[in-house]
Image: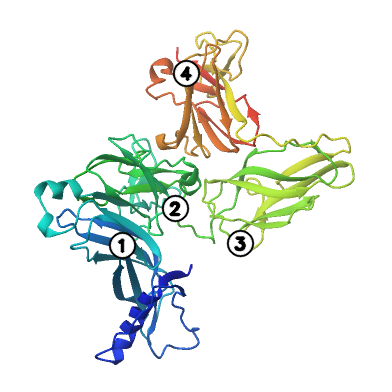
């Protein structure tokens, strides 16, 4: 918690406010020119020493929003948001003072003795009316416990100078709202929506798009403002506070677009994977009309994290299982020079019914650890069905040879389990140490690429032969065999999409808000996404999209699997993965 700096003159006012409790007529004292002083946030005595007197302090203010009301003379309100350290601390007093073109405001707190307190941080919100009547035109600053804002008066703020034209022309508007976590927890096997959830037309559940009591804000999300109807951005940005609140002030009348890009650099690590539930499914933008002096509130955005909140499970009767998804880097038998340092990454999936809590860990179970830490605690919980990336720092041994290390996941009791729950099945890395091994090159940033080909996987069902296989077995139905031959044609004009994060585990395509880019296959059926940074991506071919439906339906994928039109791949910096192909068999 940071220390706030306030003018000494306000500290004097604060002191008077406290001592006034014991004196009916406190005498004012002369104050010197304001000097910046450090004011510590109130700290409570240790819990072993009960409070015998009230404890006063200065509130921790986290954001300030200056609002200009629709009136003349102009009225200015300051919306201050912050957090109190516990459930017993309350706002005690709000003291405001103007020095020339600067308003200084102090919000003080108090905790009364002999109270039983919760230690959870308590958000607060205070609206403070500034005395701006008869102020001359000009720019003004506002400081609330060290957090700053500002406003501008285009004309003198006097009732005598007010005219209808002046009132309209000087009134500015504001937009504020909240980004919140739209909660929906689903247990495995649920067939009816749980509280806060709705059933989706294509199967599955999502949060209901309603801001309900107890649903938390999402901190640190970057919100964009654009001029005109959506889509638009570029005017400015705001970042949500601890309660998920954001604000844009001093806006001229007119249309605006408020939007949030979940794939943006600041937002991706906070929001992905997940989807919007409000204002609409998969839509993270809202058009707003600001009129003179209006404050447009509740321009909210609801976000449903794909794997949060965690469903309820019973640790006593759930099962622990691992599904090995893929090696993310360093294929087996990669050659290293003696003593070379590297990080091995795997992608796994929690295929059991237990939640892997932060008490679970990655554990070394045999072979050569290659100087790695042998127990690595998980940094976040992993829900059933959720993929997770495992990274282990290692060092190649000094002696040339072949080395293999075996790894598993251990539960909260430290008991390891392997692939599909079998103790004998581990995920591993095998390397070769050689004196003449080529050193690992350092690739340039944003030099990775993903690509492949889309081809027609040809099979005549009425006369099955080469290039066909029976699916399902014994059905008498034949489809393309999932391998491309020289006679099978490429498919130009097919739209391929790229999104961040892993592909949805339920077989659906990623939400529209998660799509980073789309490309269309060329005459040779090939597509390419280049200039990519390292990270996890989902490449998918949406057969039912507007761009593809008339080109593909009726038909189905045969590669990468029957009915599967997506690939999850984790790119290393500079890696070129150009064999993420799609085979399509048109229905006869």
Nearest the eye: 405 or 352: 405
Q: As rendered, which of 3 and 261 lies closer to the eye?
A: 3
* Residue situated in front as seen by the camera: 288 or 576: 288
Q: How far, Cα to Cα, is label 4 from label 3?
A: 48 Å
Check residue 220 in the rendering and tell me which mark sits there, or answer none.
2
Camera-nearest residue between 499 and 258: 258
- Which residue is tagged 3? 412
Task: Tell me if I can see residue 489 in this picture.
Answer: yes
Image coords of residue 460 (percent x, y): 52, 10
Q: Quadrant of residue 257?
A: top left
The disc, 2 or 1, on the residue closer to the chain's N-terminal end is 1
Q: Earlier in the sequence, mark 4 or mark 3?
A: 3
Front position among marks 2 and 3: 2
- Of discs 1 and 3, which sits in the foreground? 1
Front label number (4 vs 2)? 2
Q: CA distance from mark 1 to mark 3?
A: 59 Å
SS under mark 2: loop
Percent position of residue 348, x then y = 61, 44
Q: Which residue is mark 1?
A: 101
- Contact (Cβ within 8 Å) of mark 1 with mark 3: no
């Amino acid at each position: 918690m940071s220390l706030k700096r306030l003018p000494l003159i306000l500290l004097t006012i604060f002191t008077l406010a406290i001592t006034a409790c014991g004196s009916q007529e406190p005498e004012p004292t002369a104050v010197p020119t304001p000097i910046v002083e450090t004011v510590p946030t109130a700290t409570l005595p240790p819990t072993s020493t009960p409070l015998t007197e009230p404890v006063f302090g200065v509130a921790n203010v986290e954001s300030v929003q200056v609002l200009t009301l629709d009136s003349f003379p102009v009225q200015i309100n300051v919306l201050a948001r912050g957090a109190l350290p516990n459930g017993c601390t309350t706002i005690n007093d709000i003291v405001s003072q103007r020095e020339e073109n600067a308003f200084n405001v102090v919000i003080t707190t108090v905790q009364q003795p002999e109270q039983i307190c919760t230690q959870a941080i308590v958000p607060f919100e205070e609206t403070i009316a500034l005395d701006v009547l008869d102020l001359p035109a000009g720019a003004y600053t506002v400081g609330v416990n060290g957090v700053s804002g500002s406003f501008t008066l285009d004309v003198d703020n006097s009732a005598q100078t007010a005219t209808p034209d002046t009132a309209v022309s000087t009134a500015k508007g504001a937009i504020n709202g909240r980004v919140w976590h739209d909660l929906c927890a689903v247990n495995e096997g649920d067939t009816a929506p749980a509280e806060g959830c709705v059933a989706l037309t294509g199967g599955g559940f999502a949060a209901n798009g309603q801001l309900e009591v107890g649903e938390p804000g999402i901190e640190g999300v970057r919100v964009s403002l654009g001029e005109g109807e959506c889509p638009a951005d570029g005017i400015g940005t705001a970042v949500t506070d601890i309660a998920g609140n954001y604000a844009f002030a001093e806006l001229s009348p007119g249309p605006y677009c408020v939007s949030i890009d979940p794939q943006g650099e600041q937002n991706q690590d906070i929001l992905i994977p997940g989807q919007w539930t409000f204002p609409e499914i998969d839509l993270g933008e809202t058009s707003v009309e600001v009129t003179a002096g209006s404050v447009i509130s509740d321009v909210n955005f609801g976000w449903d994290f794909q794997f949060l909140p965690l469903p309820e499970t019973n640790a006593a009767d759930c099962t622990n299982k691992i599904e090995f998804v893929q090696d993310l880097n360093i294929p087996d038998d990669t050659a290293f020079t003696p003593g070379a340092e590297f990080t091995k990454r795997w992608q796994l999936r929690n295929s059991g019914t237990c939640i892997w809590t932060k008490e679970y860990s990655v554990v070394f179970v045999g072979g050569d650890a290659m100087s790695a830490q042998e127990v690595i605690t998980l940094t976040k919980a992993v829900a059933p069905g959720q993929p997770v990336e495992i990274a282990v720092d290692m060092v190649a041994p000094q002696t040339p040879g072949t080395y293999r290390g075996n790894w598993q996941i251990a539960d909260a009791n430290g008991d390891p389990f392997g692939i599909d729950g079998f103790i004998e099945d581990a995920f591993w890395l095998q390397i070769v140490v050689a004196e003449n091994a080529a050193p690992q090159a350092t690739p340039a940033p944003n030099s990775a690429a993903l690509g492949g080909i889309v081809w027609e996987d040809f099979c005549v069902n009425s006369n099955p032969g080469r290039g066909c296989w029976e699916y399902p077995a014994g059905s008498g139905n034949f489809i393309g065999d999932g391998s491309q031959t020289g006679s099978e044609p490429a498919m130009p004009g097919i739209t391929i999409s790229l999104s961040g994060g892993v592909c949805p585990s339920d077989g659906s395509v990623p939400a529209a808000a998660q799509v980073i880019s789309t490309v269309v296959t060329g005459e040779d059926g090939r597509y390419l996404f280049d200039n990519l940074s390292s990270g996890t991506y989902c490449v998918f071919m949406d057969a039912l999209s507007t761009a593809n439906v008339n080109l593909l339906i009726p038909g189905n994928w045969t590669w990468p699997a029957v009915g599967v039109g997506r690939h999850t791949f984790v790119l290393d910096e500079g890696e070129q993965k150009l064999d993420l192909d799609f085979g399509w068999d048109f229905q006869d």
